[in-house]
Amino acid sequence: MNRFTLPAALFVLLVIVLAIGIKHSPDKGIIASPLIGKPAPQFSLPSLTDATRTVSSTSLRGRWYLLNVWGSWCGTCREEHRMLLEARQSGLVPLIGLDWKDDDAQALSWLQQLGNPYEVVAVDREGRTAIDWGVYAAPESFLVNPQGIVVYKCMGELTRQIWEKEILPRLPKQQTAKS
C-alpha cells in the first residue's frame, strides 16, 4: 500500500459524508437573516409617489406589513410583480415598497405600466436602508409583525408557493380568514 492510499480514501469518505449531509439538509439554499426575531431597522425616507410625504418605520408599527425591496432595473422584480398585485388584492397584509438605488422617473413609469401593489413606496436612492436590512440583491421581502419584529425574510422572487407556505401561516388566523 503506498503512502497516498489512506489519505485519498479518507478524503473520498469525507466528500461522500459531506455530500449526503448537504443533499438531506432541509435548509439548503437558505441564507438565514440575522434580523429574524429582532426589531426591524429604523428608517425615514421620502415617498416615491408623494414628494411631501415621508415613509418611516415608526409609522408602520402597530400592524403587520411586508416590506418588498425592488428596483425598475431588476428583471426578477418584474417576474414577481404579478404575485405582488395578487397579494395586494387579497388585502391580507399591506405591501410597503422600498425602491432601491433607482431612478425616480423610471420607478414611477414602472408602477404606471405594471400597476402599483404598494400602499406606499419609500425611496432608498443611496442604498443605506437596504444595507441596514441586510439586503443582498433585489427582490427581497421582509414580513414584520405589529411589534416591529422581523418574522420572515424571502430572498429572491416572492412566489405563490412562498406566499402560501411561508407568509400566510405567519399571519394571525383572523387576518387570513378573509381569503
Image (cartoon, grey):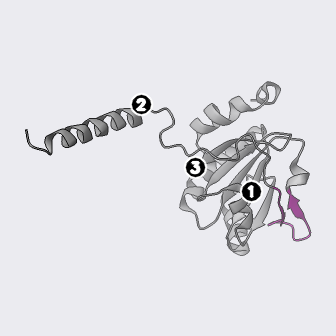
Residue under label 1? 97
Residue at 76% from the left image edge and 32% from the top image edge? 171
The one of 34 and 58 positioned closer to us in this rendering? 34
Give the amino acid at mark 2: His
Of the numbered discs in the image, which one, if any, rests on residue 24?
2
Quadrant for residue 104, please give it.
bottom right
Farthest residue toward the left?
Answer: 1
Question: Which x, y percent locates residue 116?
Answer: 73, 56
Looking at the picture, tell me which residue is in the foreground, 14 or 178: 14
| Percent x, y of residue 133 | 71, 55
Measure the alpha-carbon separation of dots 1 and 2: 35 Å
Residues in magenta, as a range: 42-56
Q: Does residue 8 sit above or below 135 in this rendering?
A: above
Q: Are marks 2 and 3 in contact (CB under 8 Å)?
A: no
Residue 127 located left or right of residue 42: left
Question: In the figure, is residue 48 to the left or right of 1?
Answer: right
Marks 1, 2: nearer the viewer: 2
Label 1 environment density (alpha carbons within 10 Å; few <14, some 14–19, many ≥20): many
Task: Give the residue at x 13% y 44%.
Answer: 3
Circle 2 — which element? loop
Q: Amino acid at mark 1?
A: Gly
Pointer 3 residue: 157
Q: Amino acid at mark 3?
A: Glu
Count of marks placed on residues: 3
Residue 8, quarter of picture? top left
Of pointers 1 and 2, the one earlier in the residue sequence? 2
